[in-house]
Image (tube, coloured by chain):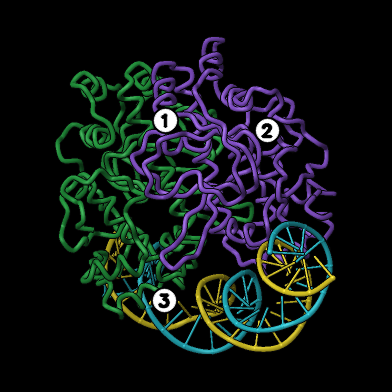
Chain colours: A green, B purple, C cyan, D yellow
Amino acid sequence: MLCAPPDYAESHVADTDHPFAGLVSRLEANQTLSREDREALLHLPNKLRQLDPGTYIVREGDRPRACGVLISGFAYRQKVTGDGARQIIGLHVPGEALDFQNLFLEVSDHNVQMLTRGEIAEVPIEAFQKIALERPNVGRAILVTTLVEASVFREWVLNIGRRDSRSRLAHLLCEFALRLEAGGAARPDHGYELPMTQEQLADATGLTPVHVNRVLKMLEAEGLIVRNRRHISFPDWHRLRDVGDFNQRYLHVRDRATNGVF
Amino acid sequence: MLCAPPDYAESHVADTDHPFAGLVSRLEANQTLSREDREALLHLPNKLRQLDPGTYIVREGDRPRACGVLISGFAYRQKVTGDGARQIIGLHVPGEALDFQNLFLEVSDHNVQMLTRGEIAEVPIEAFQKIALERPNVGRAILVTTLVEASVFREWVLNIGRRDSRSRLAHLLCEFALRLEAGGAARPDHGYELPMTQEQLADATGLTPVHVNRVLKMLEAEGLIVRNRRHISFPDWHRLRDVGDFNQRYLHVRDRATNGVF
DNA sequence: CGGGCGAACTAACCTAGGTTTGGCGATGCG
DNA sequence: CGCATCGCCAAACCTAGGTTAGTTCGCCCG
């Protein structure tokens, strides 16, 4: 099971039909915006592009010219060692901007790639810089968003550096569940369609594909996960959370309806 | 050798005598500032504090009230798993602000601690927020600084996730050398006083202290490092850089005198 | 319908790095 | 001066996870 879906993206489009609706609501989660701020964001010039899995959005060494906003589908950040080992650095779900990390730097230090098929809106980088500098609220929202991303990177360092493979994978699955639900409706069992192959899971956890396979089966045997084709769900979320040593603090989600539940 | 120096800090104080001189020059490396920007930074209200090794500057779960600027000595970021394993997330050298990561977030998601004895200047968080929001150049300089920090976190994920212990340690030693020299004078052999115990090196690389010991001796036997008490130097910097698979791009240093040399 | 392909899965074997334990030297303190 | 502490070092042993080399399964496409 757990196959990579060829065009799985459609089930995760943003709530309303405006391409930037998801982005705006995510920014508003971190910083209150005025009506004018929202309008300005919704009117950013952009070009929609449908992308296949594996398509590069940013390449290491590039000087970025556009800032991609993920409308549907999933993307990931990645970098590679000199002898070709790949490490996935982070994941992105619809509504997130992919290039805040590069918006104010000269050249990109890592790659961003589509994980599934999906759609991105490309915004000229100057337009984003302009709105960030001219509208303090928007600028602050962007700053806070990048700070939260940095917090996630830190947790990944801890996860990869100090947790064993079982906790590591459990932690990743927990994070993905919460990232998906941030903004969307929270399902009680946190189940979702996992858009990653076991090889990609390995690259995200610093393990090998065969060990990921072993651990997934271990988690399944323990009753911590249930897999059905590409769908994964969690019969005992609290135990999984314990096994993964997962504490959502590092995601810095303002607790709306979610406080205490996770 | 390689003992932790008890009060080693004094040898790395900032160039001029104003406590914020180092901070200003580091910010200016990322963003040009006006004379007024500089003046405003130099006049930030602050309280100097002398701290012993191990003193906490920020604790996970805290709501930060002040932003510390490292004047002398070294500090590190750290977080701990549920069962007590510690991972060092990043290092800080004099002149760097320690709380940009928390400046605009509600609660801290990790700990910041003194590595050596040293001095910090505590600036009320509101003062820093104010200057960041009112002076676009300063705000941008802070944003860029946090983005570079995030880039370093990403490289650490790669380093810990995908490089073997030998490359991992070599990479860390290379990074520290460059971080120390960014702003100061570059010495040809990149040697320095390493302020970390082998246990701390282990926590920074996701290894154990005894394996760090093995690897250091291995690197020494290979002629890649020379240790003399707490001082470490690099007879063949280029080979060490190759072994560590080190490419300084992720540090995003504007190449001044340094282009091509590293 | 049949071949090709990509992903999941398996098993046997191996090794990088962890664990445990203890010694040794330098430093600091009563 | 003697003791305690801390950091470095060492050796024997062990295991989590890597490596290699497959097989199986489902899906797509001609």
The kind of secondary structure element at disc 2 is loop
x, y (%) of residue B96? 58, 34
Q: Is residue A10 toward the left or the right of residue B48 in the image? A: left
The relative height of residue A99 versus residue A232 in the rendered view (above or below) is above
Q: Is residue A35 toward the left or the right of residue B34 in the image? A: left
Do dots 3 and 2 share one subunit?
A: no
Spatial separation of the CA atoms under disc 1 and disc 3: 48 Å
Q: Quadrant of residue B32?
A: top right
- Residue wearing tag 2: B182
Residue drawn where x is 47% and y is 55% of the image? B79
The kind of secondary structure element at disc 3 is helix
The relative height of residue C20 versus residue A235 in the rendered view (above or below) is below
The kind of secondary structure element at disc 1 is helix
Residue drawn where x is 27% and y is 52% of the image? A7
Residue type at the position of mark 2: Ala
Q: Is residue B212 toward the left or the right of residue B238 in the image? A: left
Q: Quadrant of residue B24?
A: top right
Residue type at the position of mark 1: Ile
Residue drawn where x is 72% and y is 49% of the image? B194
- Residue wearing tag 3: A214
Lower position in the chain sequence, tag 2 or tag 1: 1
x, y (%) of residue B91? 59, 45
Residue type at the position of mark 3: Arg
Disc 3 or disc 2, which is closer to the eye?
2
Residue drawn where x is 33% and y is 48% of the image? A251
10 Å neighbourhood of mark 1: few (<14), some, or many (≥20)? some
Q: Which disc number belongs to residue A220?
A: none
Q: Residue furthest top?
A: B35
- Residue wearing tag 1: B125
Q: Quadrant of the N terminus of chain A?
A: bottom left
